[in-house]
Each structure stands twice: as C-alpha cells, then as structure tokens.
Image (tube, helix red, strand yellow):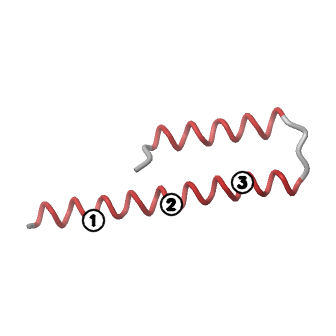
Amino acid sequence: MRSLDELKAVADEVQALLASKDLDVVECLFILSLLQYVMFHTLIEAEIAGRLEESGAAA
C-alpha cells in the first residue's frame, strides 16, 4: 500500500512537471487523470487495510 508521503511525493512531481513543461491541454488532462487514478486506488487500498485491521481486532 502506498503511504501518504509517497502519494504527496507523486503529486509534487506531477505539479513540477506541469509547471516546467510546455504541455498542451490534452497532455495536462492525461497526467491529471493518471494522478487521480493513483489517488483513488490508494484510498481504496487504505479503506481495505483499515477494514482488515478492524476485522482482525474483532476476531
């Protein structure tokens, strides 16, 4: 599972890439959609891990 620090590092890298390059709108939207995908799956992984910990603690 990705940590919040790793996710923040990815977001910082994407922000730096968007600021430093001369990208068109389609390229920016593609990069942002990839970042959204990573963030969404990180949240799902965190939710699953939390539920597994809860069920393990209850058992």
Q: Tell me the number on the disc at residue 51.
A: 1
- Relative placement, left or right, of 9 versus 52 is right
Question: Few, some or many C-alpha atoms within 10 Å of disc 3 (few <14, some 14-19, many ≥20)?
Answer: some
Q: Secondary structure at mark 2?
A: helix
**What label does residue 32 carry, if any?**
3
Provide the secondary structure element on which disc 3 rests.
helix
Q: Is residue 2 left or right of residue 29?
A: left
Give the spatial CA distance, label 1 vs label 2: 15 Å
Q: Is residue 1 left or right of residue 31?
A: left
| Residue 39 place in picture, x, y as percent | 55, 55
Upstream in sequence: badge 1 or badge 2 = 2
Q: Which mark is residue 8?
A: none
**Residue 4 point in image, percent of width and height:** 45, 43
Q: CA distance from mark 3 to mark 1?
A: 29 Å
* Residue type at tag 1: Arg
Residue flagged by tag 2: what amino acid is it?
His
Disc nearest the viewer among 1 and 2: 2
Numbered disc 1: secondary structure: helix
State if disc 2 and disc 3 touch (CB < 8 Å): no
Residue 41 — which label? 2
The residue positioned 24% from the left and 63% from the top of the image is 52
Return the residue nearer the eye: 1 or 50: 1
| Image coordinates for residue 48, horizontal then vertical, percent | 34, 64
Within-10-Å neighbours for mark 1: few <14, some 14–19, many 20+: few
At x 47%, y 38%, the residue is 5
Q: Are marks 3 and 1 in contact (CB under 8 Å)?
A: no
